[in-house]
Amino acid sequence: MVYGALDIGGTKIAGALVDTDGHLLVRSQSATPAQGSAEELMAAVSWVLGELSAHPEWAALACLGIGSAGPVDTVAGTVSPVNIPAWRSFPLVDRVRAHPSVPAGIRPVLVGDAVAMTAAEHWLGAAQGVDNALCMVVSTGVGGGLILGGTLHAGRSGNAGHIGHITVEQNGPACPCGARGCVERFASGPAIAAHALESGWTPPSGAPTTAKEVEASARAGDPRALDAFDRAGRALAAAVAATTALVELDLVVVGGGVAQSGEVLFGPLRRHLASYAVLDFTRGLPVVPAGLALDAGLIGAAAAGASAAGLSKAGSCATTPAVS
């Protein structure tokens, strides 16, 4: 028996077959044509499914979970990712279910990508055994999920914990979601790169303009690159402090591509958090890297599929209140 998983984000569409202990057996990945048409995006998803189904392990498929950038609607089975403009109320679950490689008895289960990451970190990663945790994805976008009272809290539509769209600056830059000053406009990979460029930073000759290049410059001591990560850490810290004041967190776990920069991001995040989280019950909150690195979204999507099908102990951390 294996669990299938899809992880759909603004940069990549990944898929995997996962065993009952949460180990990846097969992995496939395609770039996300984020500015393409709805059908071009779906073609990339179909390609990943085709790659997975070509492996012999596919014959043992017992369930299929989908973690997608949000917002998502787990009741309707639709997705409207902020960073994928062509998908608005896109019927992703129905389209995946109709793929010729998906067995007739498999009903895909949709969760937000950060909720999937949270389920995985609580099952096997840095949040194991923690009753109240915020798990964040800092990548092309910024998302999050909550563990409250030892249980995954996804909310009625599957979007609870979406910390990337908390406003941290009332008159801040406009966000594609329609609001202003969202965390994502300061702390996502594209936002970090854009701010560095606006400040006069230049990438090495021939290098792409990405947060990874800004990170390299920050490690070399470039003040403009360091400022871009400080700005990101400050925005994340403000949102974490606000969340902690609301629900009394025990731990914050941070994963995603930008989080791979390590102390370049975690240093300013922790420093600013100490100045924002000053009430007794918010002070001293641990902030740690994700234990499952970049595979957390896939493992969590698999866990969500297994939970909905009643297949595994993963269900104790991956149950969602409404799945399509």
Image (cartoon, grey):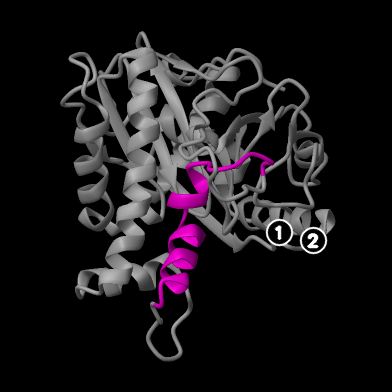
In whole angstroms, how far apart are the C-alphas of marks 2 and 1? 7 Å
Q: Is residue 313 left or right of residue 219?
A: right
Which residue is at 65% across, 15% downward? 322
Label 1 amino acid?
Ala
Label 2 amino acid?
Glu
Q: Is residue 21 left or right of residue 115?
A: left
Number of callouts: 2
Residue that carries the numbered disc 1 in the rendered image: 44
Residue 21 visible within the image? no
Picture quadrant where residue 39 is located? bottom right
- Label 2 close to label 1 by CB (< 8 Å): yes
Where disc 2 sits, the SS reads: helix
Picture quadrant where residue 95 is located? top right
Q: Position of residue 217 (x, y in %)?
A: 28, 74
Q: Quick check: is 35 in the magenta stretch?
A: no
Residue 60 visible within the image? yes
Quick check: 265 above or below 93? below
Image quadrant occupied by the C terminus: top right
Categorize mark 1 by other alpha carbons within 10 Å: few (<14), some (14-19), many (20+).
some
Residue that carries the numbered disc 2 in the rendered image: 40
Q: Position of residue 14 (x, y in %)?
A: 56, 53
Q: Is residue 106 left or right of residue 216?
A: right
Bounds of the magenta span? Answer: 177-200
Quick check: 124 above or below 280? below
Quick check: 33 above or below 270? below
Q: Nearer the viewer, residue 320 or 134?
A: 134
Categorize mark 2 by other alpha carbons within 10 Å: few (<14), some (14-19), many (20+).
some
